[in-house]
Amino acid sequence: MAEPAQPHVERPGPAEFDDPVVRTELKRATVWIGLALLVAGVIFLAQPLLLIVGGLVFAVVLDGGTRLLGRVLPIPRGWRLLIVTLAGFGFLGWVFYYAGTTFAAQFEALRVTVEAQAMRLYAWAADHGLVTAGSPDTISQQVLGSVGRLTSAVGSAVGVLTSGFLILIIGIFIAIEPRLYDRGVAWMLPLRHRTSYYQIAERVGFTLRRLLFGRIVGMVVEGVFTGLMLWAGGVPMAALLGLLTGLLAFIPNIGAIISGILMVAVGFSAGVDQGLWAILTYFLVQNIDGYLILPYIARKTVDLAPAVVLAAQLVFGALFGFLGLLLADPILAAIKVTLEQFSKQRSGLEEAESMEAAPALEPAPAADHIPGS
């Protein structure tokens, strides 16, 4: 007798999205594909993304100046922003004009002096067997080649001007109406996360305003102090070295090293006394910056360890070029503040959930209440 045929059971196929298993796997695949596309986008769109970040940083500077001016000049925000923008561009124009007319010959003399000092140092190291045979040009090419893409973002004068112009335009547009862009980003988030986003954005903006204001103050102090000290010690090109020191102070750690090498090289080119005075000036400037200015900024903003900042500069510089090196400090500060806010919000949420889940306790009797009375 033949056995009855087993009923055929239709199983869901890959196009059946109503099946819970298929939908779960589809969500997982979407997450992994999205992460892969995000990584690829960051790699191929690194320079445009950094231009946007640079525009945001410039907008923070303009917004901070506008808020600061509002404390002494109670006029509409648009007029205050216009005053800050014109004053900033006017100051930069004056600096470049003054530097171009006053320091044009000194820039060439500085280049020749640094090259001569490098040759002298190389010859001394070769005589003592500290370096292998080879020309300084070959060694410098090897060093620069190991840096990778450190200067790829600004490889030409046209690239510098174009990048700078785009950063200025993006920063001005964002500074004109920052709330508009905040609402645009929040609109792309789920409703339950928008309040958290606004809180984090406000905290990050506040921190960056304080950080960049302190950075500008440090640039002015270092530049003026360096110029005056070198001038007092008879070091050549004191004003030019002070200007370069102030500009390089925007880049923590690396900027100080470069400015120190320049001033010491120029100092020893004029004599041993001037070289020793340049070394003393460098240590005084760095101590003032390291023990007075930076700790005060860290207390008012976010405390970033110098080793972490230097590591971020090396990584961002190797991956994204000069803009990455320039923006590593504010990017790192924004990431740290964001993670701290996430941690606080999660801790507060967990505490609220634990309080809701805990059983209600009976109120304790008053201190003067006697049981049984």
Image (spheres, rainbow, N blue to C red):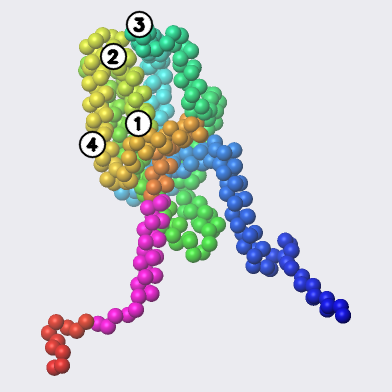
176 above or below 342? above
Task: Name the residue at 14% across, 82% down.
Answer: 367
x then y, percent, for residue 184: 53, 54
Q: How far apart are marks 2 and 4 (CA)?
A: 26 Å
x then y, percent, for residue 145: 50, 22
Q: Are marks 3 and 4 in contact (CB under 8 Å)?
A: no
Q: Which of 111 and 79 is in front in this view?
A: 111
Can residue 109 be seen in this snapshot? no
Q: In which quarter of the image is residue 26?
A: bottom right
Task: Name the residue at 56% across, 41% down.
Answer: 42
N-terminal-most mark, 2 or 4: 2
N-terminal-most mark, 3 or 1: 3
Q: How far apart are marks 3 and 1 (CA)?
A: 31 Å
- Compared across the picture, whether 275 is left or right of 58 comes to left
Q: How far apart are marks 1 and 2 (CA)?
A: 21 Å
Amino acid carrying label 3: it is: Asp
Q: Which of the numbered marks, if any, corresponds to residue 292? A: 4
Which part of the image, by quadrant, shows the C terminus?
bottom left
Residue receiving disc 1: 253
x then y, percent, for residue 325: 44, 33
Q: How crowded is mark 3: few (under 14 residues within 10 Å), some or many (20 or more)?
A: few
Which secondary structure lies at badge 4?
A: helix
Q: Distance between the residues labelled 3 and 2?
A: 23 Å
Residue receiving disc 2: 267
The magenta span reads 338-363
